[in-house]
Image: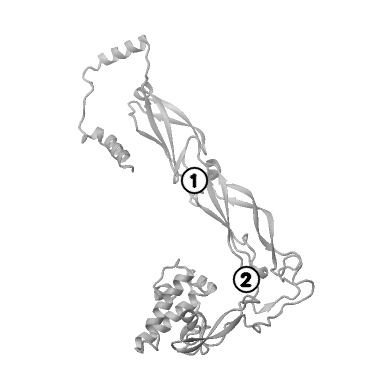
Amino acid sequence: MARDYYGLLGVSKNASDQEIKRAYRKLARELHPDVNPDETAQARFKEVSAAYEVLSDPERRRIVDMGGDPLESGGGGGGGFSGAGFGGLGDVFEAFFGGMNSSGGGARKPRGRVQPGSDSLLRTRLSLAECAVGVTKHLTVDTAVLCDNCHGAGTNGKSKPVRCETCGGAGEVQSVQRSFLGQVLTSRPCPTCRGAGETIPDPCNKCGGDGRVRARREIAAPIPAGVANGMRVRLAAQGEVGPGGGHAGDLYVEIVEQPHDVFVRDGDDLHCTIRVPMVDAALGTTVVVDTILDGPTELTIPPGTQPGEVSTLRGHGMPRLRSGTRGDLLAHLDIVVPTKLDHKQTELLRKYKGTRDRENAEVMSAQSEHNSGLFARLRASFSGR
């Protein structure tokens, strides 16, 4: 089982590099053998030192975040902890004093010129209909691409990289510092080669030795049916090419869904409002709704429909991603009472009222079944929910 390196340092998985370093320094001051000779503390010191060594390395941290353990392969030294000196702690002193100890197992290997590329993010606007049916969007992307002159080598013609004279190919330079433990040898990335261990005396005329150039290109991004606002579609290896022509990162296309004139989306369901004349609500009627995927569809409004009721068309909403099913379309019925009546209409309504003398206007209890939904909406509006 992979070790919980974040838990060993007491930080969250999204902790920054500075937060990880601060957590390690705090624990190291408490547990260092010169400060705390207890055997349990020394064992704990080895664990937190190894955790910092892993999490301070971007590549090893990436392995941890994917659920792996970079020290399980046996390449990390005795007992899964790299380096030698102080019980095989590797570069323990790098975080404790800003560098590494002379007995900490020697210098690390240079990182090399070829590095993986970064991921890229691009946003695209889609209509509700495009989100419903899926679409292929042709997008313009401005990213780093492989230099077509040196093909990532970074050199001009047949020239080759040479070992860095400043660091001797180690990728780092060292200096001696004094501390309460005595003299400590610290190291930092070489300022000349930037940790690569080699330099290019005759760089490519086009990319300047980076192995990549900025370029604008067109790509086709397939957007599946059912995407929603804020979702991201991953296009593998379509992001930035890395330094030295390293493997390209991924491109993420983020969906920005545009508002619709009729429908409001709630997950996989669609909502709309239908105005129904009072007479049609009383007698019942049929309304044709122009749905997103199915076109004109009949919606039956039963006799006696009350204001605020909702009629549902099952399976006429948005498609669900990778499921083959669909949400519902919910029609909120707004019963329209006429504000102006002519003489004939007024007389007809009076005659109708005369046939239903027992139905008169009255003040009802807030706890009655009929008013429960109304007062719930009122309370929600006043409370801002």
Q: Residue at x 38, y 16 (%)?
A: 340
Q: Which of 72/280 is in front?
A: 72
At 42% from the left and 30% from the top, the residue drawn is 274
**Residue occupying the far right of the picture:** 157
Quadrant hosting residue 161: bottom right
Looking at marks 1 and 2 on the same chain, the residue that comes earlier in the sequence is marked by 2
Residue under circle 2? 115
Q: Which of the image's four quarters has the C terminus?
A: top left
Q: Where is residue 384 in the image (x, y as percent from the top left)?
A: 33, 42
Q: As displayed, is residue 324 above or below residue 6?
A: above
Q: In which quarter of the image is the N terminus?
A: bottom left
- Residue 319's mark? 1
Q: Residue 59 appears at what percent x and percent y?
A: 54, 73
Q: Is residue 230 above or below residue 384?
A: below
Residue pictured at 21% horizontal, 24% vertical:
362
Tell me residue 240's x, y (percent).
63, 62
Q: What residue type is labelled 1?
A: Pro
Q: Which SS class for mark 2?
A: loop
Along the viewing direction, whichever of 202 and 128 lies nearer the viewer? 202
